[in-house]
Amino acid sequence: MVDNSPLIIPRRTLLKGGAALGGAMLLSACGDSAPKSAGKSITLKDQRGTVLTFDGPVKRIVTLPMPAASIMIAVDRSAARLAGVHDASWAAANQSILGTMFPRVLKVPHDIGTQEFAPNVEGILALDPDVVVQWANQGDEIIQPLENAGLPVLGVNYGKLEDVGSWFRMFSTVLGRPERGRAMATRLDSDRAAVAAVAAKRTGRAPRVLYFNRFSESLTVQGAGTFNEDYVRLIGAENVSSEVKGLVEVDLEQVLDWDPDVIVLGNFDEAMPDDVYGDRRWRDVAAVRARRVYRAPLGGYRWDPPSHESPLMWTWLAQIAFPDGTDGGLRDKIVADYRYFYDHTPTQSEIDTMLWTEANGASADYDQFSA
């Protein structure tokens, strides 16, 4: 007989999470019901449906999924509770303003998992975490070793905007700040509605956008059903790669056939607009002829995948696709969002760095983002 009652996980006493429970006493994966706590205890349900109960707000957190560290920092407005992060998260912080805003994150141990997110269980145990955040949708083999070692695991899914809202709620709950997560989720929904409202007023031909998740080693695009396609459509543009599904490698011949008006290079490799402009094989692509190739901004986290900074990507991309001689309020929004998420007021120089103003400077209409 299976015991479906939630388990209590005292701080530093590493026990497995219990099985899922329904009911209003739990925080659902979608964050529809608020968590209840007995005394100082905190109970929530992760995105696997697994129930975890802690004896109070967690103080030591290990994160394996790449966006989790920056989102956890944004929820807490601090890096003080991060005990360990994946190397990819550390690298993103080291390359971005996150390491400047929170120097402590660059000192956090980051040899806790492989590139495929298989955990270094011994290394994680040595960090004495209260909770480990791990992918819930990439197979049990990257979660079970942690749970077999007695570590409480908060399983998370990723890929949709709804997942980001769920992360806000779950992370804020284990941090003992549930109201912060609810406010962040509401803010995210409001930002999306505002972008959609502006897009609904646009008329005329929709510009054809092609986003490269990877460019240097392979031409990897985001097709139908992806988050990137969702926000290309959100701003009123067309995703030219929608005829393929998911994350797909294509060849140059396919790109020439699509002939996009705008090309966006993601932040998952080192490709820059000059790499495209300087390659004669690309000279007949409409975006290259018009010099409309851009490197996506890099802020506290990469702007192109789902995160709390996604609304900044939407604002930036809307101005790239529909330039009107202004920055669309982007620089002001960066300042407002960074104060809200990080308690940091970025300088104009820091904003220039985020926006890759030098690398993008030779591309059409990028002077709209000048300070």
Image (cartoon, grey):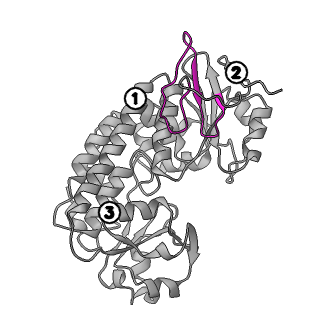
The amino acid type of the residue labelled 1 equals Arg
Q: Secondary structure at mark 3?
A: helix
Residue 33 is situated, as x and y percent measured from the top left of the image, at 49, 29
* Nearer to the camera, 21 or 85: 21
Mark 2 or 3, nearer chain start:
2
The amino acid type of the residue labelled 2 equals Leu
| Mark 2 to mark 1 CA distance (whole Å) | 25 Å
Within the magenta stretch, is there residue 183? no
Q: Looking at the rendering, in which quadrant would you find the C terminus?
A: bottom left
* Vertical position of residue 339 compared to residue 97: above or below: above
The amino acid type of the residue labelled 3 equals Leu
The residue wearing badge 3 is: 317
* Vertical position of residue 20 compared to residue 267: above or below: above
Residue 347 visible to the viewer: no
Residue situated furthest right in the rendering: 1
Residue 140 visible to the viewer: yes
Mark 2 or 1, nearer chain start:
2
* Vertical position of residue 315 compared to residue 237: above or below: above
Q: Secondary structure at mark 2?
A: loop
Which residues, given as a range, are shown in magenta? 26-51
Q: Secondary structure at mark 1?
A: helix
Q: How many numbered circles are shown?
A: 3
The residue wearing badge 2 is: 7
Mark 2 vs mark 1: in front:
2
* Nearer to the camera, 42 or 327: 42
The residue wearing badge 1 is: 180
Residue 143 is situated, as x and y percent measured from the top left of the image, at 72, 41
